[in-house]
Image (cartoon, rainbow, N blue to C red):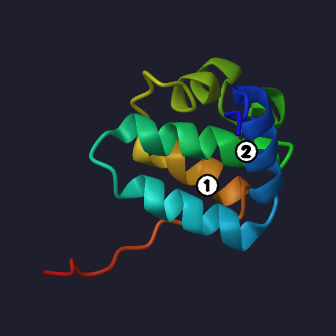
Amino acid sequence: MTKPRYKEFREHLLQKLKNPEAALAYLNEASRDEDQRVFLLALKNVSDAQGCDISTLSHDTQLSRQSVYKVLSEKGNPKLSSLKLILNKLGYEIALQPLKR
């Protein structure tokens, strides 16, 4: 059995992330990682899957293209307000819950 190529995996992933419930579970799981880059990559994947490119997100959120690009980049360090705007455009919101200890 050969390993799937990255492009094939990404296409498969994006197809799965078109489902809002799958995308929500994916984002929630990514948010649990200590490395924020994991969540930002997941957010980029979800936006790509839902057909929201940088231009669309910029227009719909009133953020500059550069700001959206930075939020969705691996080196991004977004403001909470920017993150909330993008999540809202994708149909999600941030919710807090008690820690499970």
Assess disc 1: are there few (<14), some (14-19) or many (≥20) residues with their C-alpha within 10 Å of its C-alpha. Answer: some
Is the residue under label 1 in contact with that under label 2 (CB below 8 Å)? no
Assess disc 2: are there few (<14), some (14-19) or many (≥20) residues with their C-alpha within 10 Å of its C-alpha. Answer: many
Q: Secondary structure at mark 2?
A: helix
Measured along the vertical axis of the image, is residue 23 above or below residue 10? below
Who is closer to the viewer here, 100 or 1? Answer: 1
Who is closer to the viewer here, 99 or 62? Answer: 99
Q: Secondary structure at mark 1?
A: helix
Q: Amino acid at mark 1?
A: Leu
Measured along the vertical axis of the image, is residue 53 above or below residue 17? above
Picture coordinates of residue 40 (x, y %)? 50, 39
Q: Which residue is mark 1?
A: 87
The residue drawn where x is 70% and y is 22% is 65
- CA distance separating discs 2 and 1: 9 Å
Measured along the vertical axis of the image, is residue 77 above or below residue 1? above
Q: Is residue 15 left or right of residue 68?
A: right
Q: Which residue is mark 2?
A: 47
Q: Which mark is residue 56?
A: none
The residue drawn where x is 68% and y is 67% is 22
Mark 2 or 1 closer to N-term?
A: 2
Q: Which quarter of the picture shows residue 98?
A: bottom left
Picture coordinates of residue 27 (x, y %)? 54, 58
Q: Amino acid at mark 2?
A: Ser
Picture coordinates of residue 48 (x, y %)? 77, 40
The residue drawn where x is 59% and y is 45% is 43
Q: Quadrant of the N terminus?
A: top right
Camera-near label (2 vs 1) is: 2
Q: Is residue 18 left or right of residue 28?
A: right
